[in-house]
Image: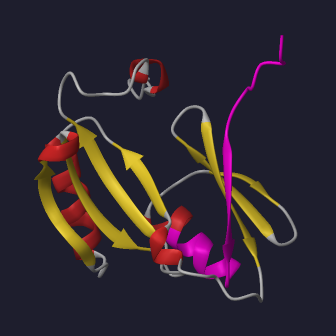
Amino acid sequence: MLPKIIYPITFLKTKNLEENKKFYSGLLELEVALEQTNCIIYNIGSNGYWGFCETSEEISNPEKTCLTLVVETPDEVNLWAKYLKEKGVNLTKEPSMYEKYQIYNIFFNDPDRYTLEIQSFEAGHEPKNANKFKIDNSS
């Protein structure tokens, strides 16, 4: 039997670690899990992480990489859209239903031009075991 995987981290390149931190930690209010010399890792939900490492290399087609954050309802997607617009972020896709996948979503880009999506699944169309990843913010 293989050892159990305990959590995922997705690593991407960034051209400017400070701009990245302003965007993800500042604007999106993601918690910094770990800062290293040229890398930063953010908590995503209850069991995931996104890491960014600074590079002088060209980032090839960053807009083809989509980082998705899932919220519970279409109303929450709309609140994110409103907040991002108020902060001067250009939405590349306004809030709308995507019938093919039964999701309601928006798209925008980070400073490195990676595509970010905020979405909610229609009831009954969530991934298997999605509830175990929800964060209890009631305390």
Foreground residue among 121 and 80: 121
Colouring of the image:
secondary structure
76 in relation to 128, above or below: below
Quadrant of residue 18 within the rendered picture: bottom right
What is the x, y in percent for residue 36? 84, 63
Horizontal side of 74 relative to 112 (left or right) equals left
- Residue found at x 55% / y 74%: 22
Quadrant of residue 15 within the rendered picture: bottom right
- Residue found at x 27% / y 80%: 90
What is the x, y in percent for residue 134? 43, 26
What is the x, y in percent for residue 33? 70, 48
- Residue found at x 16% / y 55%: 78
Horizontal side of 38 relative to 59 (left or right) equals right
Q: Residue furthest right?
A: 37
Q: Residue furthest top?
A: 1
Q: How many marks?
A: 0
Quarter containing the C terminus: top left
35 in relation to 21, above or below: above
Q: Which residues are magenta?
A: 1-23
- Magenta run includes residue 7: yes
- Residue found at x 69% / y 32%: 7
- Magenta run includes residue 119: no
3 in relation to 39, above or below: above
Horizontal side of 3 relative to 69 (left or right) equals right
14 in relation to 33, above or below: below
Foreground residue among 115 and 87: 115
Quarter containing the N terminus: top right
